[in-house]
Amino acid sequence: FGDGALAGLRVLVSAGPTYEDIDPVRFIGNRSSGRMGFAVAEAAASAGAQVTLVAGPVSLPSPAGIARRLDVRSAAQMREAVLGAAASADIYIGAAAVGDYRPAQVASRKLKKRDGAPLVLDLAENPDILKDLAAASPHAFLVGFAAETHDVAAYAQDKLARKGLDMIAANRVGEGLGFEADDNALSLYWPGGGEELPRASKRALAARLIARVAERYRMARS
Ligand code: C5P
C-alpha cells in the first residue's frame, strides 16, 4: 500500500468486453477496447490502492502498479472471477462491457450455411454482476459504468438506483468518444449529486474519477 487518496484500500476493477461463443470459431462480442477500465486500474494503483484487474479479451499490457490481473473471456467467467475477488475488495469499479446475452447453446461443431434459409440464434440473458454484488451484505462500494447512445442522464440515474450503486460513470458512445476512442467524456452521478467530466484523455478522466470515488468512499464509510 502506498500513499495517496486510496492508500490502504483494495480496489477491484473489471474492464473490456466479453465474448460469448456461438460455435468453436464464432462469438458475439462488443466494441469495448478495455482502455477506460485499464486507465481506471492504473489511476487507482497510483492513488495507493492494491488493485486487482479482471480483464475480458483485450490486447493491452497490464497497467503499471497493479497487484493482480485475471484474464477471462465470457460473462460467466468474468462473473466467477469478480465474485471470487469481491469479498476482499473495498471498492468495485465495473468498467467492463459485459455482454447482456449469450447463445443459449454453444454448438460443438462449426455451424454451416443454410442454403439461403435464415439462421436463428437463441440467446439467454446473462446475470448482472453488479446487481449480484449489490445484493450481498456487507458489500463493497460499487461503481458502475453506463455507455449510452441517447438520454444518457436519465438512463444513468435509473441504473444507479435500480442496481443499488454508490456511483455511476456515464458516457455517450459515438461522436468520436467512448468505445475504441482515445478520448472520452463522463457524467458522474451518485445519490444526491453529480459531476461533469468534460472531454479528455481516458487517463486524465480516470484520475478525476478515482479522486471522486475516494472522496465518496470516505464519506460513505465515515
Ligand atoms: O445495464 P448496463 O449493462 O448498461 O449496465 C452497465 C454496468 O453494469 C457496467 O458497470 C457493467 O460492468 C455492469 N454489468 C454487469 N453485469 C452485466 C451487465 C452489466 O456487472 N451482466
Image (cartoon, rainbow, N blue to C red):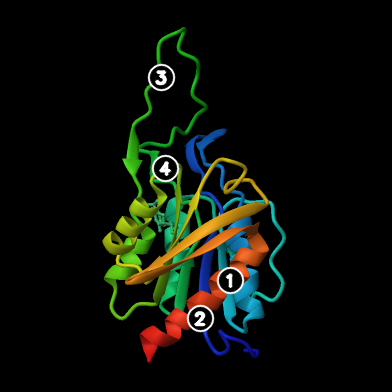
Mark positioned earlier in the residue sequence (3 or 1): 3
Q: Are marks 2 and 4 in contact (CB under 8 Å)?
A: no
What label sits on residue 150 in the rendered view?
A: 4
Q: Secondary structure at mark 1?
A: helix
Mark positioned earlier in the residue sequence (1 or 2): 1
> Which residue is more in the foreground, 153 or 105?
153
Give how far apart the Cα atoms at labels 4 and 3 are.
30 Å
Residue 7 image offset from top left, x and y in percent: 58, 88
Give above or below for 118 relative to 63.
above
Q: State the residue lying farthest toward the top.
A: 115
Circle 1 crowding by C-alpha within 10 Å: few under 14, some 14–19, many from 20? some
Q: Are marks 1 and 4 in contact (CB under 8 Å)?
A: no
Three-letter code, disc 2: Ala
What label sits on residue 208 in the rendered view?
A: 1
Residue 125 image offset from top left, x and y in percent: 32, 44
Residue 122 image offset from top left, x and y in percent: 34, 31
Mark positioned earlier in the residue sequence (1 or 4): 4
Q: Nearer the viewer, mark 3 or mark 2?
A: 2
Give how far apart the Cα atoms at labels 3 and 1 are.
46 Å
